Amino acid sequence: MGIMMKEVDELSDMGRNVIVTSHYEVIEHENGINIIKPKTAGKAVDNYLSLEGRFDIIIYAMLDVDSEGNIEYKFLTQPKGQYHNLRSPFGMFDKAEIPNDMGIILDYVNKYQEEAL
């Protein structure tokens, strides 16, 4: 993971938007609350590094199935239930759920960055 993060940091320092995808795992806590987090190589990594702590924007891909069985793929942009670690700068996304299209995500990011200047 160290090599990957070094590359991410170098690209980010050059002003590039960097997109990192990951599988996730469900962590079951004693209090009955399940938390979803990026899957890492194990507890040793989790004890020394918060992967999601390295990023300004964290979204999750999800799907909704309606009563007729139609599937709609989406990105969740704001914390909701067990997706507690989602984040983005305030005002970047105008909706909690947006279409699963990375081009749309980049449009939101670029618009936010242009307005911030």
Image (spheres, grey):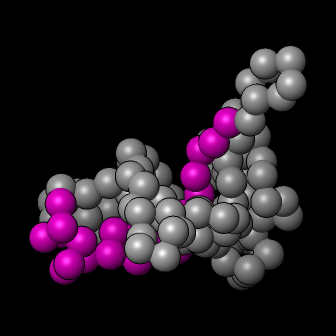
- Residue 76: x and y in percent read 68, 54
Q: Nearer the viewer, residue 18 or 35?
A: 35
Q: Quadrant of residue 27?
A: bottom left
Compared with 100, 77 (above or below) is below
Q: Is residue 37 visible?
A: no
Q: Is residue 70 visible?
A: yes
Location of the C terminus by quadrant is bottom right
**Residue 18 located within the stretch drawn in magenta:** no
Q: Nearer the viewer, residue 86 or 94?
A: 86
Q: Count up the numbered dots.
A: 0
Q: Quadrant of residue 37?
A: bottom left
Which residue is at 76% across, 29% downward? 65
- Residue 74: x and y in percent read 71, 41
- Residue 105: x and y in percent read 67, 51
Magenta-highlighted residues: 42-63
Compared with 14, 36 (above or below) is above
**Residue 57 located within the stretch drawn in magenta:** yes
Which residue is at 75% across, 69% downward? 92
Compared with 67, 87 (above or below) is below
Q: Classify residue 3 as left or right of residue 81.
A: left
Q: Nearer the viewer, residue 107 or 92?
A: 92
Which residue is at 67% across, 77% downward? 89
Compared with 56, 25 (above or below) is above
Q: Classify residue 34 as left or right of residue 14.
A: right
